[in-house]
Image: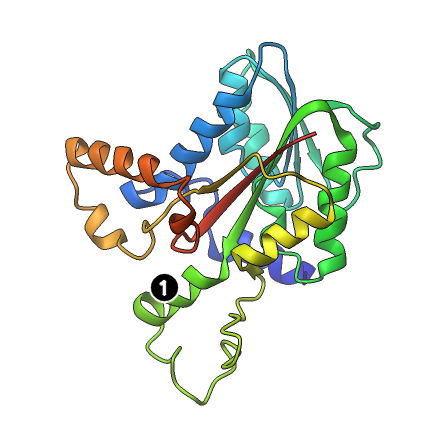
């Protein structure tokens, strides 16, 4: 992970506060993840969110009455999160790095959310450490959520949506043999490599979710849907999102495991 690149991307390039709610298509990831997170929660659960950004998930969970410790790497994002905290929220904002959870004791939290840190660690050892630390602070019987960006769908959207030059021979945008995409400061992984990472850390697959499916590829069409049609599209997406065949065709993925 390049520190300056990650800070730059979230201070100058992306408005993280609106990314998950700006349009029909951009909301699918959040709506899907929210549903799966809430389905696993119990009254009184203590939650740690790593990479909380501006607090989209943290605020939602606080509104539901949960105590949330929100750790965020980018100071600008954390400032937005702090500004949005209401008197009725039980939120503990912390500026910090998902690689160093030494301030938290073993088995401190009922639920740990990793909704962004693994987007940025290109080094396998760092990804491995994030998973290990997440599971260390998770209580026995608790649930951990890990979000990933899917290499194989990024290849599709880069080819057909974002870049006229992506498929030309004279660039280093992807490995021409393995089709591994270079997308710094983002790290994109295949479904197989995600499963291998989790297997190495003895994180049994409870559920594996296609968080947004075709949302990015078909965003121009999905964004034109009326509320009624979008609701029907969401029902179809939720019908599909746990199917094996959906995983490779989703830009964002959510791996859920129990301890």
Along the line of sight, which residue is nearer the eye, 75 or 100?
Answer: 100
Quadrant of the snapshot with the C terminus: top right
Q: Residue at x 38, y 80 (%)?
A: 167
- Please give the count of numbered marks on the rendered protein: 1
Left or right, 145 with reference to 248: right
Q: Which residue is mark 1?
A: 157
Residue 43 percent location from the top left of the image? 58, 10
- Residue at 53% x, 67% y is 183
Which type of secondary structure does the marked residue at label 1 adopt?
helix
Residue under the image location 35 percent in, 71 percent down: 159
Position of residue 164 in the picture relative to residue 207 (left or right) = left
Q: Quadrant of the N terminus?
A: bottom right
Q: Residues within 10 Å of mark 1 (few under 14, many from 20)?
A: some
Specify the farthest residue to the bottom: 170
Residue 185: give x, y in percent of width and height.
Answer: 58, 62
Q: Nearer the viewer, residue 116 or 146?
A: 146
Question: Where's residue 110, x and y in %?
Answer: 68, 21
Task: Please say whether residue 111 is visible from this viewpoint.
Answer: no
Where residue 58 sits, quadrant-wise, is top right
Q: How is the image coloured?
A: rainbow
Q: Nearer the viewer, residue 176 or 91?
A: 176
Residue in the foreground of this view, choosing between 187 and 6: 187
Is 163 left or right of 223, judged from the image as shown? right
Residue 94 coordinates in the image, percent (x, y): 70, 33
Q: What residue is at 77 percent from the left and 30 percent from the top?
A: 137
Viewer can see residue 134:
yes
């Amino acid at each position: 992970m390049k520190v300056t690149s990650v800070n730059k991307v979230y201070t100058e390039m992306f408005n993280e506060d609106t990314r998950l709610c700006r349009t029909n298509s951009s909301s699918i990831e959040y709506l899907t993840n929210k549903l799966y997170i809430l389905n696993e929660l119990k009254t009184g659960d203590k939650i740690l969110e790593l990479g909380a950004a501006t607090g989209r998930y943290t605020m939602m969970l606080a509104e539901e009455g949960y105590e949330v410790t929100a750790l965020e790497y980018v100071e600008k994002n954390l400032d937005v999160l702090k500004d949005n905290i209401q008197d009725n929220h039980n939120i503990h904002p912390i500026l910090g790095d998902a690689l160093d959870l030494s301030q938290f004791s073993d088995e401190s939290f009922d639920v740990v959310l990793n909704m962004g840190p693994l987007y940025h660690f290109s080094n396998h050892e760092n990804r491995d450490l994030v998973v290990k630390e997440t599971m260390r602070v998770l209580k026995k019987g608790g649930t951990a959520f890990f979000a990933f960006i899917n290499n194989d769908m990024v290849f599709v959207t880069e080819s057909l949506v974002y870049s006229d030059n992506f498929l030309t021979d004279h660039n280093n945008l992807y490995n021409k043999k393995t089709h591994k995409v270079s997308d710094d400061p983002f790290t994109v992984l295949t479904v197989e490599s995600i499963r291998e990472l989790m297997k190495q850390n003895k994180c049994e697959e409870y559920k594996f979710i296609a968080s947004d499916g075709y949302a990015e590829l078909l965003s121009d069409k999905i964004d034109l849907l009326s509320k009624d049609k979008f609701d029907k599209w969401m029902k179809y997406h939720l019908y599909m999102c746990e199917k094996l065949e959906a995983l490779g065709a989703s830009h964002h993925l959510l791996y859920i495991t129990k301890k």
